[in-house]
Amino acid sequence: MSAVLVDVRPRQEYETGHLPGAVHLDPELDLSVADLDARDGGRHPLPDPAQLERVFGRAGIGPSDFVLALDNGSGWASRCWWLLRHVGHDAAGAIDVRGYVGPLSTEIVEPDLTDFQARPRMDDTIAAEEILARLDDPSLLLLDARSRVRWLGDEEPLDPVAGRIPGAVNAPFTEPLPAGAADAAEIVTYCGSGVTACVVAQRLVLAGRGDVRLYPGSFSEWCRRESYPIEKGTP
């Protein structure tokens, strides 16, 4: 097994200096879909398997490679990890390069193309419609990975409406999992647009909850749906 380093920071940061040998994937263009209506998929819709085959093949990822995604604490490395897992490539991890101490390179790495084959999972996402139908279901735990002020609805810098999905528990991606969260019958993670929720999902997988599901559209989709309820304040 060989390792592939994938830097998912903005291009300018990659070009300024990156871990030697790391290839670059653009978080907005490669790990998301641009120019779609946020009412159907949120601000960072999931790429389809065909796009991910092209993206990961361009990164030189082979079937036996271990992929280590790198970011600066933004959550995009975990998004890359989640997308790889989503299409059947489980040998992956994510780290924050701000903790790296060592040489940096400015060489633009262009690996040989590979024939990446996607084998999409069918059980790792949940749609807004199912969440809406199950808001009163105590067996379903919704974890909101945004900051506490956004979860409370006190601030909302990105989306047109502040608040949270009713019943959601705050689990900021910058903090450890809430006590007992990994013991819930069913777990769904969401955030503003489906990026930092992947950080929480990754922690849950590492805690033994490989059945955790992601709500890809997250709050940016939910808050744009007419008549979908929104909760604010302290429960």
Image (tube, rainbow, N blue to C red):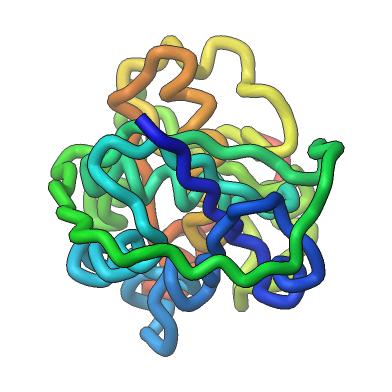
Q: Residue at x 75, y 59 (%)?
A: 105
Q: Nearer the viewer, residue 114 or 234?
A: 114
Residue 116 in sight: yes
Q: Nearer the viewer, residue 168 or 57?
A: 57
* Place of residue 207 in the rendered image (x, y in percent of width and height, measured from the top left): 48, 14
Left or right of 221 in this view: 192: right
* Place of residue 202 in the rendered image (x, y in percent of width and height, measured from the top left): 48, 32
118 lies above or below 88: below
Q: Quadrant of residue 157?
A: bottom right
Left or right of 116 in this view: 173: right
Q: Quadrant of residue 213?
A: top left
119 lies above or below 217: above
Q: Tally the marks.
A: 0
Residue 228 in sight: no
Q: Quadrant of the N terminus?
A: top left
107 lies above or below 166: below
Q: Residue at x 74, y 76 (%)?
A: 12
Q: Residue at x 63, y 33 (%)?
A: 171
Left or right of 91 in this view: 122: left
